[in-house]
Image (cartoon, grey):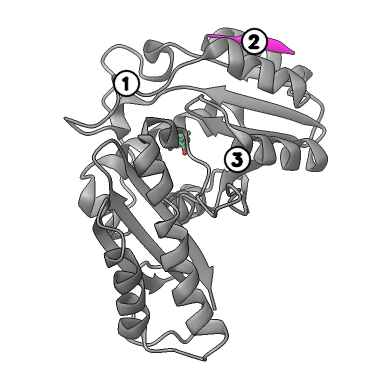
Amino acid sequence: MEVVRDRAALAAARPRLPTPVGMLPTMGALHPGHRALLDRARAACASVVVSIFINPTQFGPGEDLARYPRDEAADLATCREAGVDLVFIPPVEEVYPPGASTFVDVGPLSERLEGAARPGHFRGVATVVTVLLSLVRPDVVFFGQKDGQQTIVIRRLVRDLGLGTEVRVVPTVREPDGLAMSSRNRFLSPAERAAAPILSRALQAAADAFHQAGERDAERLRSLMREVLASEPAGRPDYVSVADGDTLQELATVEGPALLSLAVRFPSARLIDCQPIG
Ligand code: PAF
């Protein structure tokens, strides 16, 4: 496994990789959810590239950039174990050269839901993903379903900019009690950790109503999620959403692919989860 830290070394290593090249962009703190993505990439591609970069432009003021978990040695061990070929761990100036002034803005898609709660977040995500895909030029890039809006934003930017990479979305890996794996779970206190499966329970209640009871009224599905979340006072809901799976516009009736999503604020961390339906 080769580890490179600058654009020049990456450019030198890239032509040696057998194709198809699969890529997993990450911010490190790799957990079993990332491992599932790595295993998918390993099975589907002749070589696998991982980027580890905590992207400052996707964190707003007062968010958790400074305390975002960092453990390069553990991340490299995970990559080695998963059979990764190349790891790109750039410092900030290799991603954003001094004076960098170009940003990628995907438009209204990135202003809804997480974008409304975290202004500028998806501008940062879209920009860093565009830079990373331009530098690595993978044939396939892998993302986790947990960050559902992120996958929709990235599919759109890859299409709009003709980046020539296939975007594959891998199902969310969950703890046995349903909590979606996330680097931020480690911030939860024991009491918050015990309460956190409320997110997946709320999503499941709405998904069951959709699949088993044939509920198509989106407001009814939102109410179901709100009711389940209200049973857990430790977490304060930020939003619940039943939105079109492509435009993320809130729906009145679910008639095609849709995304159930929600965000809940605990005192120690803000968690998100989602589930596609339809
Ligand atoms: O999902 C993440 O870890 C990040 O948002 C990503 C896609 C690596 C961009 O920094």
Q: Quadrant of residue 92?
A: top left
* Residue annotated with mark 1: 67
Of circles 1 and 2, the one toward us is 1
Seen in the image, is 76 located left or right of residue 83?
A: left
Q: Main secondary structure of the magenta part?
A: strand
In space, the residues marked 2 and 3 are separated at their CA atoms by 22 Å
Identify which residue is drawn at 27% across, 66% down. 230
| Mark 1 vs 3: CB contact within 8 A | no
Q: Name the residue type under label 3.
A: Gly
The answer to whether residue 265 is visible is yes
Seen in the image, is 181 located left or right of residue 68?
A: right
Q: Earlier in the sequence, mark 1 or mark 2?
A: 2
Q: Name the residue type under label 1.
A: Arg
Residue 84 point in image, percent of width and height = 73, 23
Residue span colored magenta = 1-5
Seen in the image, is 269 located left or right of residue 259?
A: left
As displayed, is residue 268 above or below residue 219? above
In space, the residues marked 1 and 3 are separated at their CA atoms by 20 Å
* Residue annotated with mark 3: 33
* Residue annotated with mark 2: 3
**Image quadrant for the C terminus?**
bottom right
Circle 2 SS class: strand
Identify which residue is drawn at 56% across, 83% down. 211
Circle 1 SS class: loop
Residue 234 point in image, percent of width and height = 27, 51
| Mark 2 vs 3: CB contact within 8 A | no
| Mark 1 vs 2: CB contact within 8 A | no
